[in-house]
Structures are given as structure tokens and as C-alpha cells.
Amino acid sequence: MRPPGSSPVEAEARGQITTALVTTIETLTAEITRIEAQIRKLFDAHPDQKIFASLPRSGMVWAATLLAEIGDCRERFPSDDALAALAGASPSTRQSGKREQTVFRWSCNKKLRRAVMDFVNGSRFGDEWAMQVYQRAITRGCRHPHAIRILARAWIRIIWRCWHDEIPFSPQLHESRKLSAA
């Protein structure tokens, strides 16, 4: 059936374009499925998989991305501050003479920042503590991006501790996070 107001030639051309687009989408979907299966296989085989998969609402993609960006060389991040700085979750201080200013950290690993911030933003919907930290920041007058960075800093402390001690995240084990409100 041809669309109203179109000529038979135009209708035929649009039909061929639509068929080509559907074929392209099917090909891309199959390739995405294949790549996700490969990521799942590699992620499941990694010794630190249990740590990152245990994070609330991390999902396979966020957990695998966090693992890939943080890595497994624990000497690379001797403290949670080092990880937070590389992830862009800690502020940067500029000083000139007697003037000191705290500003957004532009210099960081952008892929790691994106992985952390995506995870953190999603975590507030699946974890009551994360939502409370975020809401307290908003109540204090922080805008959404700043509140997410505050929550990211809190999560990085927990992620670093789990990663460094090689233990999965557990809300019962990490009771101290209730006290560590940002």
C-alpha cells in the first residue's frame, strides 16, 4: 500500500530505504548481542568480577566498565583519594597568593569519570543510603551534577575499600556508610 499523496516511484523508493534500514538495525542488534556475550564471558572470568557485580544497580555493563577503567593493579591507587582524583570526583584547589578557590576537576580520566558517574546516578534509585546522600546535597543547595560528584566521592571510598580488600560489597558489612554522609 502506498502512502497518500506519493507517486508509485516514491513509494517504491521509500519501501527500499525502509527495508535497508531494517536490515541495518537487525545486523547491528546481532553484533551488539555478540559483543555483549563476549564482554559477559570476559567479565565473568575476571577475579574481581564479584566485587564490581555486587554494587547496587551496577548491571553487567557498568560493572564491567568500572572494572575495565579501574583495572586490577591495586598499587596504582594507594588510597581512595587517588582513585577519586583520577575519576574527577574530588574537587581541585587553585591558589594564588592569599586567594584559594575550590573548583571542578577538569583534569581526570574521562572514561573513568563517565563510568563512575553513570553508576552513581543509577545507584541512588536502588540504594536508600545513596538516595539520602544525594538528597542531603540537593537540600544544601547543590545542583544535580555537584550532588552526583558528592555521592561519587562517597561511593569511591566504598568501592576502593572493597576492591583493595578483595571483598564484594555488602550493605551489612558496610554499615559505616550510614555514618559517612558526605
Image (tube, rainbow, N blue to C red):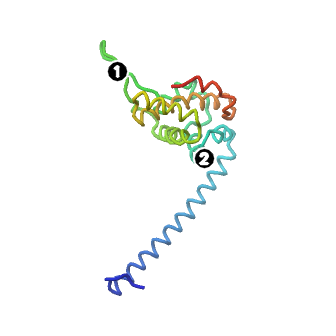
The quarter of the picture where the N terminus appears is bottom left
**SS type, badge 1:** strand
Q: Which amino acid does label 2 sit on?
A: Gly
Label 1, on which residue? 101
Residue 137 x/y as whole percent: 46, 29
Q: Which residue is drawn at 68% across and 47% down?
A: 44
Provide residue 7's location: percent of width, then percent of height.
Answer: 32, 86
Q: Residue at x 63, y 56 (%)?
A: 37
Judging depth in this view, the residue of 110 and 147 nearest the camera is 147
The residues bearing labels 2 and 1 have C-alpha atoms spaced at a distance of 37 Å
Direction top: furthest residue: 98
Q: Where is residue 89 in the image (x, y as percent from the top left)?
A: 47, 31
Residue 66 at x, y = what percent?
56, 40
* Total numbered circles: 2
Residue at coordinates 58% horizontally, 48% vertically from top-left? 61
Q: Assess whether mark 1 and mark 2 are in contact (beta carbons under 8 angstroms).
A: no
Return the residue at label 2: 59
What number is the disc on residue 52?
Answer: none
Q: What residue is drawn where x is 44% and y is 32%? A: 138
Q: Residue furthest bottom?
A: 8
In this view, 161 is above or below 6: above
Task: Determine which quarter of the picture holds residue 96.
Answer: top left
| Secondary structure found at label 2 | helix
- Which residue is nearer to you in this view: 38 or 3? 3
Instruction: Give the residue type that dot 1 points to.
Output: Gln
Could you say which is closer to the camera, residue 97 or residue 181?
A: 181
Mark 1, other Cα within 10 Å: few <14 / some 14–19 / many ≥20: few
